[in-house]
Image: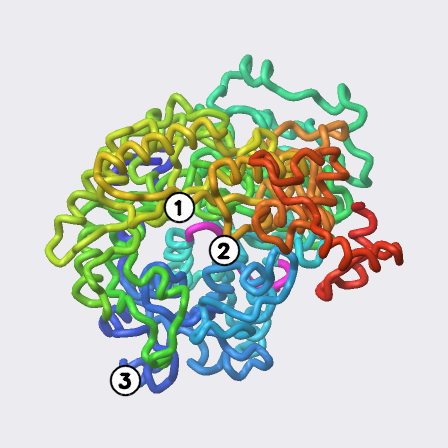
Amino acid sequence: MSNSNTASDMSSYLAPEKRIFEYPKYWAECFGAAPFLPTTREEMDQLGWDSCDVIVVTGDAYVDHPSFGMAIIGRLLESQGFRVGIIAQPDWSSAEAFKALGKPNLYFGVAAGNMDSMINRYTADRRLRHDDAYTPGNVGGKRPDRATLHYTQRCKEAFKGVPVIIGGIEASLRRIAHYDYWSEKVRRSMLIDAKADMLIYGNAERPLVEVTHRMANGETLEQMQDIRGTAIMVKQPLEGWRGKDSTTLDAPGTIDAIINPYIDTTKTSSCEASNNAEPGAAADKRAVDVKDAVQTLSIKPMAAYEPVKGQPWFKTYAKLPSYDVVKSDPIMYAHASRVMHHETNPGSARALYQEHGTKNLWVNPPAMPLDTEEMDYVFAAPFARVPHPMYGDEKIPAYDMIRFSVNIMRGCFGGCSFCSITEHEGRIIQNRSEDSIIREVEDMRDKVPGFTGVVSDLGGPTANLYRLHCKDPKVEATCRLPSCVHPTICDYMGTDHKPLIKLYRRARALPGIKKVLIASGLRYDLAIRDPEYVKELVTHHVGGYLKIAPEHTEDEPLKHMLKPNMSSYNKFQRMFEKYSKEAGKEQYLIPYFISAHPGTRDIDMVNLALWLKKNKFRLDQVQNFYPSPMCNATTMYYSEVNPLKKVTRDSERVSIPRGIRQRRLHKAILRYHDPKNWAQIREALIEMGMKQFIGKGPQCLVPAETHAEASRSAPKAARGKQGLTKHISPRSQKMMRRTR
């Protein structure tokens, strides 16, 4: 959310001690930049290297482009003077592939790739995918399940004693005990399961640069315990840190006088803290019934410690319920998730401490966001912007998708409960300068083969958050709300799109640029606050269709998604149609929706389908809710309570479309126009007492059963057996019978 171009412009709470380009260069800078980071010993020899300082292992094909994690990290460390090698999609059956570049002088850096490996390999119905967009030829099976675990183990086997640092989205979103949808259980922190030496979460640049330089200067990872954005294993809480016991429901027990982790920390006076504190354990006898859930911590006082005025979170940590507790108690899991999500603002976050049996996890507060100069520095690296030559002419679909696009920012303050962007990249928008973005467009124009003058996207995680920020730096640095735009747009949130309009105009005026399209997801609730932006977008930057994501039409699902109601969509639609007409263009909105999201009932899906029919939408693609690690919606799915509210044993239960029958029904209803789904939808409508929506009328969702259909289904009905597809396992059949 910061709109600053320099570190000095940022809130003092968000300013780092050192910026990433202020470190003295490592001695190996004399080798200069490589055309591609080496993937073989032969390539190392060509560069004159006898060894690599850091070796990055990734589950993706190596594409030297700033949209690929291994390229960003590799080029960043190269700019610091380090020699970085890449091992891409190695054969994990043995350690041999991990020896390809020799022993790294400092450490292995391991990541599963740009996607969580489980999401990459399995559908929302847990079916195995047979493709992989991040692999040459779109071939599936080139990375293992939970790739970070396998790669780390093989690195350890290849060179004993070499530190392994894990990161990327897979490790980042599994940094504490987390529900795993594929095994249907709570798993330990990935740091522990991988047996890695350190986990770096979120955008890794700042902690990674610090760690690498300190290791190069002779420090061990054991000496680097308090680096922001890292997670480590400890025997006990770090010396000099004060603890807050958050192992009980709704009643964090005081160890030192610290504000409750749930409350708004902008209210720092003792009076306000007292008035806003939630009930204590004595007042809530229902709190916990799990062994060792309530315990005090013994902390040695720090003699020289002085709390920072106005910063009660300084040098404090929240003790989460242990892994042994949350793995067997969904309500306590929801509580732990709630506390963790309240500790994600880098300006005011506390560290987290969680016991895992005999092991203890320590998660330092998030790294400070990059300011604009630092973002420009990262994107100024000499990326080749194409896949490594070893792939020849093989297509890599993920690269083809972004080949002619430019990333202008990071982060999202939307906080959508089903999305992991906020948990991984943070709420604070990190912006590139206009000059930096324009240079990349020119570089792409001049360097990338096949460029025809059309920029496919000028955006980021969200298309129109560029330069949007909180109006009050202190509020920005201390706010703990999960979203800046729900249930309404915060009064502190700026909605001026003028910097983005200026960028659009400058980009499309460049020589050789025929068109600049916007393909990133659009926050239409913010866009309608600035009609000039909507007019600019619709007039110049829509290629016939504009994809937006209302996700649902009904209030109950939208409330659990933290998405705006349909009034915002309707207003944006009217503006879109008006400005399209004024521009003399025939353009269409393509809305995206999620089925089976927590908080969604069968009736909600029917109402959504009726809205689709009324508005003449027929969806070709439908996304069933996917419980990805650490998301608030995943916590709802597992615990059946809402972690966005205070968690108690009596918390209102959230409606969860859990059984495979119900999940497939919700998906089928969204595709009401497909005859394959009519029988299933009819059965559901009859069960719901909504027969009026079966027939030929304009208000009907599906036609009545034909004589031919009745004849085909009669024998099955006579036998009294449930019709099952060939894809349903015996276990899933049991789940289906339970949900009927």
| 581 relative position to 333: left or right | left
CA neighbours of label 3 inside 10 A, class few (<14), some (14 to 19), many (20+)? few
The three-letter amino acid code for the residue at tag 2 is Ile
Q: CA distance from mark 3 to mark 1?
A: 46 Å
Q: How is the image coloured?
A: rainbow
Q: Looking at the image, can residue 630 be seen?
A: no
Given residues 172 and 520, the one toward you in this image is: 520
Name the mark nearer the viewer: 1 or 2.
1
Q: Relative to residue 133, is residue 562 depicted above or below? A: above
Q: Position of residue 508 (x, y in %)?
A: 17, 49
The label shown at residue 169 is 2
Q: Is residue 676 left or right of residue 218?
A: right
Of the numbered discs in the image, which one, if any, rests on residue 317? none
Q: Residues within 10 Å of mark 1 (few under 14, many from 20)?
A: some
**Residue position marked by numbered label 1 in the rendering:** 547
Q: Residue at x 32, y 60 (%)?
A: 66
Q: Amino acid at mark 1?
A: Lys
N-term mark: 3 or 2: 3
Query: What is the magenta range?
Result: 192-203
Q: Quadrant of residue 290?
A: top right
The label nearer to you, 3 versus 1, is 1
Looking at the rendered structure, the secondary structure element under dot 2 is helix
Number of residues whose C-alpha sits closer than 10 Å to that of mark 2, classed few (under 14), some (14–19) or many (20 or more): many
Residue at (71% x, 22% y) in the render: 280
Whether the residues at callouts 3 and 2 have beta carbons within 8 Å, the answer is no
Query: Does 99 lie within the magenta span?
Result: no
- Label number found at residue 46: 3
N-terminal of the pair, mark 1 or mark 2, is: 2
User: Which residue corresponds to the image point at 70% horizontal and 44% vertical from the top-left?
Assistant: 682
